[in-house]
Amino acid sequence: MIKLVALCVFHFLRLAERVLPLSVLSFLLWPPAAVWDLLHLRQRTPLISWRRFPESWRPKRWRFLLRQSLALYHAQLLYVWPDRLRSARWLSRCRLEGGSEYIGSCEGKRAVVGVSLHFGPVAILPYWLRAHGIVLTSVRTPAIDYLEDLTNYQFSLSPPADVPVFLSTSEIGLSPRLSSIRKILGPIKRLGMLVDVDRGKQFYVRFEDRLFRMATGPIRFAQMLDAELVPVLIVETATWKYAIHFGSPVPQQYLDNSADMEAIGTHLLQEFSKVITRHPEQCN
């Protein structure tokens, strides 16, 4: 029953996006999206999260709670129609700040591991990148079993069809081999990963008055693929308007041989901080 309802809602939303002006569609979707946020508010524990942020990342409490309670899911609803983000009416709503060198063919270019945080509408970052011609495959946890078919169909909508938009952690395994990763990625040689996940080996980096726990996965993959490690964040600048920020790649000397984890983590946090301090209410 749940699967049938989800399927009907999915196709209804795609139809609504096709026939309604975006301002009307956005307005109509606010109430159900806010209800969804409120239902999941307790498990997000926003007040606990707010206290964990360093001082420079800490938003005004009321703005943070308001976004967590009423605006988080609404900003990510675009995942229902990823195939339409390349159209003029959508593409004009997302600008790139840097990253132009990654647009287009990957042939002859160095591999790239884009690393991000749970910040802003990060769930739709891969779709917007692909809409701009920056094709990568992002790592995520497996889909919920009873929605797996619908999820896989939704993933397949994001062009190009021959390059998977997501790679499940179960496909990678605990000890991935270089040959298997290259086979999965194919010629694109671009991988997107989150560095603040509680998965795999971890390390700690001091930043301001806090210790940040970070996953080593993106760093290890960058080493395996001889890739650039590039910080990338997405923010919602206004309702359904976005900006994608590319930071400076991690210096190669930090990645050579035995990686300098502290230097890598510090570089990433400094690059992330340039964006987060401007939009602290979008910390998740």
Image: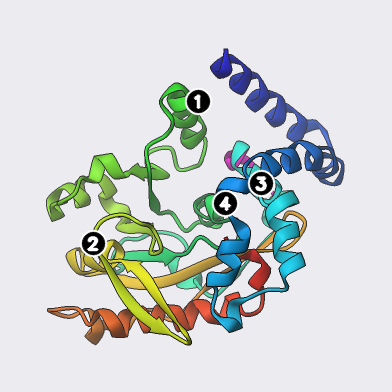
Evaluate whether residue 238 shows in this view: yes
1 or 2: mark nearer the eye: 2
Q: Secondary structure at mark 2?
A: loop
Q: Secondary structure at mark 1?
A: helix
Identify the residue shown where x is 58% and y is 40%: 83
The magenta-colored residue range is 81-87
The amino acid marked with disc number 4 is Arg
The amino acid marked with disc number 1 is Leu
Give whichever of discs 1 and 4 has the lower sequence position: 4
Quarter occupied by the N terminus: top right
> Percent x, y for residue 35?
74, 38
Residue 15: which quarter of the image? Answer: top right
For the residues labelled 2 and 3, say whether their Cβ atoms are less than 8 Å apart: no
Q: Which mark is residue 81?
A: none
Q: What's the CA distance linking mark 3 and mark 1?
A: 19 Å
| Residue with the most extreme top position | 1
The amino acid marked with disc number 3 is Tyr
Q: Which mark is residue 201?
A: 2
2 or 3: mark nearer the eye: 2
Give whichever of discs 1 and 2 has the lower sequence position: 1
Disc 4 target residue: 44
Disc 3 target residue: 73
> Percent x, y for residue 173?
20, 45
Give whichever of discs 2 and 3 has the lower sequence position: 3
Which of the two residues, 45 or 278, is positioned nearer the viewer here?
A: 45
Q: How many marks?
A: 4
Give whichever of discs 4 and 3 has the lower sequence position: 4
